[in-house]
Image (cartoon, helix red, strand yellow):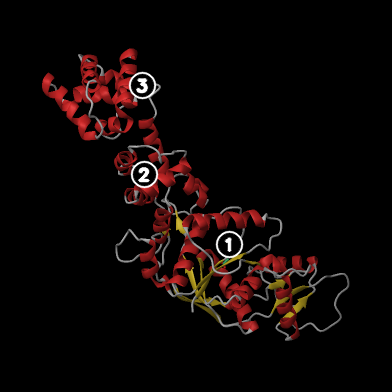
Amino acid sequence: MITTRFAPSPTGYLHIGGLRTALFSYLWAKHNSGKFVLRIEDTDRSRNNEDATKAIIEAFKWVGLEHDGEITYQSKRDEIYKKYIDRLLQEGRAYRCYMSKDELDAMREAQTQAKERPRYDGRYRDFDGIPPEGIEPVIRIKAPTSGTITVDDGIKGKIEFNVDDILDDFIIARSDGTPTYNFVVAIDDALMGINSVIRGDDHLSNTPKQIVVYEALGFALPKFYHVPMIHNENGKKLSKRDGATDVMMYKEMGYLPEALLNFLVRLGWSHGDQEIFSFDEMLALFNPKDINKSASIYNTEKLDWLNAHYIKNSSNDTLAKLLEDYDLLLSSHDKREILLDAIKDRSKTLVDMASQIKEILDTPDSYDEKAVKKAFKGEAKDILKDFKQKIESSQELHLPSDYHHMLERVVDEREIGFGKIGQPLRVALVGKMGGPGIDTIMSVIGKDETVARIDNILATV
Ligand code: GLU
């Protein structure tokens, strides 16, 4: 069975890059009918873990990812870590280091002078004398002192680290007894049964240290997958300046969770040249071996394109329900279907969709000056009056085609181009140029409101 995990450090919100890692981990577990678990890496007690956890759960809920079983909190596992520290001490695989601050400074200074890499030189590794007074020791693990450590990465292939270049006997417990990051991550992953570790490649340099811990404790190594970062269009690591990093901001901006997940799965993973993936397809097709070796580029246009696709292909029931979150209640509107059918093909986001709909439903309270100037030339007002009279005396006006028929009558009788009535009428209806067909708009707002809007503009221009 494959068990994967998502192991965020609580920052107060779920980061978009974190969601991609979570998605990859989720898909790989579920593709194999395995488990996807959640661990909160909250060893930094100064942060507000509860809020951060809530934010992650909220974001997971929104996109529809669910973790299996209980959440693991590192902050609640001190006893466990302590047990393993004691075991390593007893077995002679870790030791107490009594180096003082002055000793440390002198060591660093000498290394700088000699142009050597700063590292602990192992001076207490075999110490069996009387410990110096007044120093609370740290605990260091006995790391290999020569050779290589190989990470057999599922994305990048075999990566060899020269022990001499990267390792020393690193600290696994500080002088106050608290365990360190790489130590607890390795223990947690092993005890939680994680056999596929999928994470950002910014963690690659931690992996050799974690392997040292696995080996010291006799744990089986998981398969590691280090996913290249998401870059902005300038090839730099994605940051707040490039747009939203908080997943819930995407909801606020009107993205559908399906679109966001589809966008994220394609950031670094591909299946031929397919762009659109339903969630079931992602589950069926995802394999971390197909993750690209190089960084992926965040591209807002692509996200908008996917979002437009998912909006267009959503049922009107679904859209009406989603739009409630954007202050738009359409459930009782008798022309809901006509309205949504007309707008969903031309919306990038739900925010955009809600605003286009409001522009139709709300009587305009002002008119775009340029549009008025352009539309109200010559006999525009007469034409509008004529049209208004025609619809006032007509009983059967419901569908866009009914209104269209009326427009054609005016155009035919007066022998004018369609624009001669279309433009002033459009400005009367929505206050500006642009928007869906005017016959659709009239059908949606109905005859009385259409007449009222024509009266309004006739009284104004
Ligand atoms: N807590 C780490 C982070 O939020 C992830 C650790 C891991 O995946 O091993 O970046």
What is the CA distance from the residue labelled 3 to the residue labelled 1? 50 Å
- Pick whichever, 277 or 321, lies toward us: 321
Q: Residues within 10 Å of mark 2 (few under 14, many from 20)?
A: many
Q: Are marks 1 and 2 in contact (CB under 8 Å)?
A: no
x and y percentages locating residue 245 in the rendered image: 51, 51
Answer yes or no: disc 1 within 8 Å of ligand 1.
Answer: yes
One can see residue 122 in this view: no
Q: Secondary structure beneath disc 1?
A: loop
Task: Report which quarter residue 133 is drawn in.
Answer: bottom right
Q: Residue at x 47, y 48 (%)?
A: 250
Q: Earlier in the sequence, mark 1 or mark 2?
A: 1
Mark closer to the chain start, 3 or 1: 1
Q: Is residue 393 left or right of residue 96?
A: left
In whole angstroms, how far apart are the C-alphas of marks 1 and 2?
A: 31 Å
Quadrant hosting residue 143: bottom right
Label 2, on which residue? 348
Residue 193, image x and y in percent? 57, 77
Q: Is residue 452 left or right of residue 217?
A: left
